Structures are given as C-alpha cells and as structure tokens.
Amino acid sequence: MIKSERGSIWAYEKTHLLVIPCNIGWRAKDQANVMGRGLALQAAKKYPDFQMWFGKECAARGAETPVLRYPDGPLIAFPVKPLNAAAPWMSWKNKADLKLIERSAQQLDKLPTDRPVAVSMVGCGNGGLDMSEVRPILDRHLSSGRFTLILYGGEAC
C-alpha cells in the first residue's frame, strides 16, 4: 500500500518530484498542452514552459504519450485523460481513464528518480473518477516506499 500524508503537494516541491495529472493533447496553433484546471493549471503557472514542453511531447507521441519527467523542474507529467484524436486541444475535457491511469502508474514505478515522488489522487478531481477506483491502482503499483500519496482537503487516507 502506498504511504499517504495530508497536505498540499506544493509543500513537497523542494524535496520530492511532483506527479502532475495531465491530458494527452495539444493546441493546433502552438502545440502547447491545455492545462485548464487543477494541479496541471497550477503547474503551468509555476513552470510556464511546462505546458509547451508536454504539448510538444504529446504531439510527437500521440495516444501513447508516456509518463515523462520535465527537464526544467521537479515535475512528472502523468497522463490521466486520453487523447481526443479528432480535436487534441479538447482532450482536457475528457473524463480520466482508469486504464490510462494504470498504464501511467506502471510507467511511474519504473521511472528512474533521484529523489522521492509525491503523488496526488490522480484523476479524482477534474478527472471525475472516484478515489475508491483509483486508490487500488496506486496501491498496487506505487508501494515501493519512494512514493507518497498526498491527500488534500477532505480526501480520506
């Protein structure tokens, strides 16, 4: 089972890598990822090049865009919302997908890291999923001890 703590994921910014739930998509005009709400929007405001970097990765890799470490900060882009192939700039409106979260959790577990990793309850805020569906996936794949689930507000441990 993944260990959990209560607080803001941003309180871990100096000591941990931060998992940022993202959609797989990009805007046609500049290939930036649309990070319209939640932690993704907060990350885009703190690290302005993050959404351009991840959008270009999505445009190059398409629906199979993996979990990726941002080279210019302590962020890990963690896909939770699948690509809308007909309108990639609208992918942010999709509901989060459990199969994509499972794939992303498996990839995160294998991602080499130089420090601990703080994980939010991915897909449960603006992704529209229930924690009872997501928590077992995180417990199954991220229980090695280097991951900490950061629960915000009224989320149960």
Image (tube, rainbow, N blue to C red):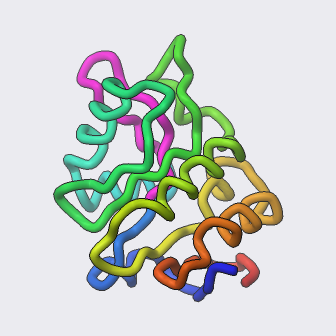
**Residue pictured at 70% horizontal, 68% vertical:** 140
**Quick one: quadrant of the C terminus?**
bottom right
Coordinates of residue 153 in the picture (x, y in percent): 64, 79
**Horizontal side, residue 60 vs residue 148: left or right:** left
The residue most toward the top is 86
- Rendering quarter of residue 13: bottom left
Magenta stretch, main secondary structure class:
loop
Total number of numbered discs in the rendering:
0
**Residue pictured at 54% horizontal, 50% vertical:** 104
Q: Closer to the camera, 111 or 59?
A: 111
Q: Closer to the camera, 27 or 69?
A: 69
**Quick one: quadrant of the N terminus?**
bottom right
**Residue pictured at 71% horizontal, 79% vertical:** 154
**Residue pictured at 50% horizontal, 16% vertical:** 87
Magenta segment: does it hold 123?
Answer: no
The residue stretch that appears in magenta: 20-36
Magenta segment: does it hold 24?
Answer: yes
Coordinates of residue 31 in the picture (x, y in percent): 28, 25
